[in-house]
Image (cartoon, grey):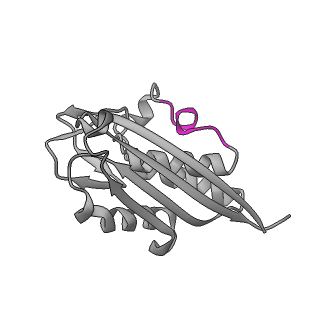
Amino acid sequence: MSFRTGLGFDAHAFQEGRKLVLGGVVIPHSRGLAGHSDADVLTHALMDALLGACGERDIGEHFPDHDPAYEGISSLVLLEEVVGLLRERKYRLVNADCVVVAQEPRLAPHIQAMREALAFTMGVEIERVGVKATTTEGMGFAGRGEGIAAMATVLLQRPET
């Protein structure tokens, strides 16, 4: 068996008048995140980790923000495409571990729903998907409530050919 790791990161600023979507879950909050798609930083970081693990370029290369086809699109739809690419190349997700960095809103009540949505979309058991949330104790852009960031790491497995 061959193993590959990947690391992903994304950050978006808050924007009035948008829904806040994290891990495919709409989170009640007064502001959403700015972006061309649904601006789901958690799913974006996860997709970049998956793409990196199989030697691909980032999501901006695969789903450019100047393409009207991706305007307002659910990041879970894009994640399905990334997973399809992995399957074509015979990669299997061993596990994903993700961290959302946000001073607000409180995310603990939504973690399980995020794990379920991501696992379902990727077609894996929920035990293979970790999601955690942390604050920055008031430091940096996330700490000042200007936006949210997310990081993800993945381990992929593929049979030797």
Q: Is residue 36 above or below residue 90?
A: above
User: In the rendering, at what x and y percent does residue 139 appear?
Assistant: 30, 37
Relative to residue 129, is residue 38 drawn left or right? left
User: In the rendering, at what x and y percent does residue 7 appear?
Assistant: 57, 48
Quarter holding the C terminus is: bottom right
User: In the rendering, at what x and y percent does residue 70 appear?
Assistant: 42, 36
Is residue 78 visible in the rendered image? The answer is no
Relative to residue 15, is residue 123 drawn left or right? right
Is residue 15 visible in the rendered image? The answer is yes
Frontmost residue, 21 versus 154: 154
Relative to residue 31, is residue 59 drawn left or right? right
**Residue in the image at 23% along x and 32% along y:** 15
Toward the right, the furthest residue is 161
Quadrant of the image occupied by residue 142 = top left
Total residue callouts:
0
Relative to residue 34, is residue 70 drawn left or right? right
User: In the rendering, at what x and y percent does residue 39 appear?
Assistant: 35, 40
Quarter holding the N terminus is: bottom right
* Magenta stretch, residue numbers: 56-64
**Residue in the image at 39% along x and 65% along y:** 115
Q: In this view, does 159 lie above or below 103?
A: below
